[in-house]
Image (spheres, rainbow, N blue to C red):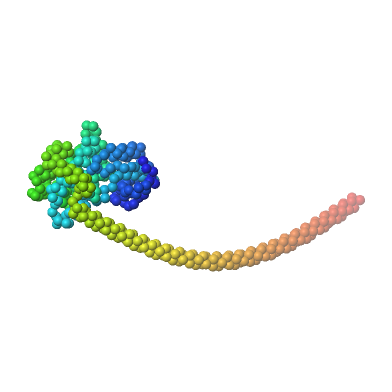
Amino acid sequence: MQPADGYELVKVLGKGSFGAAWLVRRRKDRAQFVAKEIKGFATMKPRERDMAKHEVNMLRSLNHNNITRYVDHYEKGQSLFIVMEYANGGDLYTKIQSQKKKLGGGGFTEKEVLHYFCQLTLALYHMHEKRILHRDLKTQNVFLTADGVIKLGDFGISTVLRNTYEMKRTNCGTPYYFSPELCLNKPYNNKSDIWALGCILYELATLQHAFDGTSMKALTQRILRGVYPPVSSKYSKDLRDLIAAMLSTDPAKRPHIATIVQLPFIRAALQSLQTDVRAAVQEKRSCVDEKDRQREREEAARRAEEEKAARDRREAAYKAQQAEREKVHQERLQRMQEQMAREVKEHEEKLRRIRELEKANDAKRKAEAAERQKKLDEERKIREKRRAEIEAQNRQREEEWERNMKKAKEEAEMRARARAEAEQREGDRVRAHAD
C-alpha cells in the first residue's frame, strides 16, 4: 500500500453516499488513476471496517481487461482511498447521449452495439464466475478508454455471493435498472444483474431507457409489466430475442451470463472483436476506426471544453457568491457597528440620566436629611425647654413643699408649746386649788 502522500488529488469526478470519486495523480510517475473515497473509515465500527477491507480484497481479486483494475489503497485523515484504473474516454451514458444528438435519435449499428455489449458481457461473466454481484449496473458505471475498450467499474456496493449463490435482500440499484423482483422487495441474485445488462443492451439499440415514467410509481408499474417500446427491426432477430429474454419479468426465464456468452451470434461477435483487437495490436493501432477515434477525440475535446466552461462558471458563481457573502457580511458588520454605536450612545444617555437622577436624589436626600435634622434640633430644644420647665416646676413644688413642711412643723411646735403651757397652767391651777 502506497503512503497517503504517494498520490495527489486532482479533481472530483463524482460523489456518492459513501464519499467522492477523485481523479488522483501518482507522484512517482505522474500516472493518473481514480480514487474512491470512503469517508469516516477511521471512525467506522469494526464490522464496517472489515466490510471495507473485504471490498478491497474483492477488487484485488478481479483481473480482467474489461474491468477497472485495482491499483492500490491508502488511508488519509478519516478516509480510506481505493485507487483504481482510470478510463479516460468517458462513460457509456455520455457515448449514448452523443450518439443520440448526432443521429437525431437513431441507434448504433449492430456491430457497434455488439462491440460494447460483448466486452461488458465478458466483464460480468468474470464477476459471476467469482461469485460476485455488481448490483449497480448502468451506463454511467460502464467506462471507456480512448481506444474504445469497455471498463466496468464502480463496485462500491458489490457483494460477494455465497458458494450456493445465496440471495441478498439489499436493494441498491439505479431505479431505471431495477428488476421486477427488486420493485417487489424480493431477494436479489445474479439474475438482477442480467436484467440491468438487458436494459443497457436495449439502450445501446434504441438510445432510450427500456422503462421510464413520470414518477417512481409509474416507472415501477412499467417494470412490473415488463412492457417496453419495441426494438427497431434493423437489428437482427437474435439481438431482439436476447433483449426480450434478458428483460423477462420472471427471473428464472432470464439466461445466465454463461448462456449469453455461448450464443452463436455472440460468439461470432466475440471472435470478430478478438480478430479486430489482434489486428490492431499487430498494426500498433487502436481497435477503433480512425474516424471514430477522431470523433472520440473531438468529443473528448468538447467534453473538456464543457468541463472547463462548467468549472469557469462554477468558479465565477463561487466568486460571485463569495462577493455577495462578503457584501452581506460587510453590510451586516456595518449594521452591527451602527447598532453598537446606537446602543453605546443610548447607554451613555441612560448613564447620564442615571447620574443626573442620582445627583438630584442625593441633593434631595441631603435636603431631607437637613430638614430632619432641623426638626430633630427643634424637637430637642422643645424637649429641653419642657425638661427645664418641668425641673423648675419640680423645684418650685419642692420649695413649696419644704415651706409647707416647715410651716406645719412650726405650727405643730406652736401647738405643742400651747398645750404644754395649757397643761402647765392647768397644773398650776390644780395645785393652787389643792393648796
**In the depicted view, which residue is nearer to us: 404 or 413?**
404
Image-quadrant location for residue 99? bottom left
The residue drawn where x is 35% and y is 47% is 29
Residue at the front extreme of this rendering: 283
- Left of 257 or right of it: where is 21? right
Q: Position of residue 149 (x, y in %)?
A: 22, 46
Image-quadrant location for residue 195? top left
Tally the marks: 0
- Left of 177 or right of it: where is 428? right
User: Is residue 302 at least partly visible in the picture?
Assistant: yes
Above/below status of 360 relative to 166 = below
Q: Position of residue 243 (x, y in %)?
A: 13, 44
**In the depicted view, which residue is nearer to us: 266 or 339?**
266
Above/below status of 313 relative to 65 = below
**In the depicted view, which residue is nearer to us: 220 or 387?**
220
**In the depicted view, which residue is nearer to us: 375 or 292?**
292
Q: Position of residue 315 (x, y in %)?
A: 33, 59
- Left of 218 or right of it: where is 306? right
Residue at the right extreme of this rendering: 435
Q: Position of residue 103 (x, y in %)?
A: 14, 56
- Left of 368 or right of it: where is 333? left
The residue drawn where x is 34% and y is 49% is 30
The residue drawn where x is 21% and y is 34% is 165
Which quarter shows the N terminus?
top left
The residue drawn where x is 21% and y is 55% is 294
User: Is residue 393 at least partly visible in the picture?
Assistant: no
